[in-house]
Amino acid sequence: MEFVEIELTQGNINNDHLYLSSVIEFFPSDSIGGSNDNSLAPRALEVHSGISSPVRTDIAGDKKIFRRRAWVGEFFEVHNLAAGDRVVIEKTGADRYHVYPKRA
């Protein structure tokens, strides 16, 4: 099982995203695109969060966040997450990842 952990910041909570810069090497380099939808990465990732349908997304290379992030706010709310909490990103397949809160 391959996984990484990230710590949530208040910026994550306020803006409904996950900073991936500290774990960017965990993802395939061809899943990292440019700064906008005109420069999507050639490889999309399938992200499962357990609260909605899986999301197909690349990583916005300038910000180091999942480009499609509408699900992130709901994920934070459902799990009652706050700044300082930790989230696990587990690789479960070639291009498939499971995102879930780390529990103590």
Image (tube, rainbow, N blue to C red):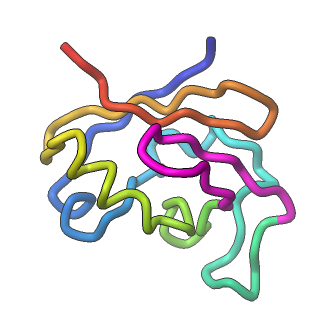
Residue 25 location (% of width, % of height): 63, 39
Identify the residue at the far bottom of this view: 38
Residue 40 location (% of width, % of height): 75, 74
- Left or right: residue 74 versus residue 10 is right
45 up-or-down from 102: above or below: below
- Left or right: residue 101 versus residue 58 is left
Residue range corresponding to the magenta coloring: 42-58
Location of the N terminus by quadrant is top right
- Left or right: residue 34 versus residue 87 is right
Residue 49 location (% of width, % of height): 47, 41
Identify the residue at the far right of this view: 42
Question: Exactly how many numbered labels are in the figure?
Answer: 0
Q: Is-magenta flag for residue 2?
A: no
Location of the C terminus by quadrant is top left
20 up-or-down from 37: above or below: above
- Closer to us: 81 or 25: 81
**Residue visible at 68% across and 76% down in the picture:** 34
**Residue visible at 62% across and 61% down in the picture:** 59
**Residue visible at 45% across and 43% down in the picture:** 22
Identify the residue at the far front of this view: 52
**Residue visible at 70% across and 37% down in the picture:** 96
Q: Is-magenta flag for residue 48?
A: yes
Q: Quadrant of residue 2?
A: top right
86 up-or-down from 8: above or below: above
30 up-or-down from 51: above or below: below
Residue 30 location (% of width, % of height): 81, 55
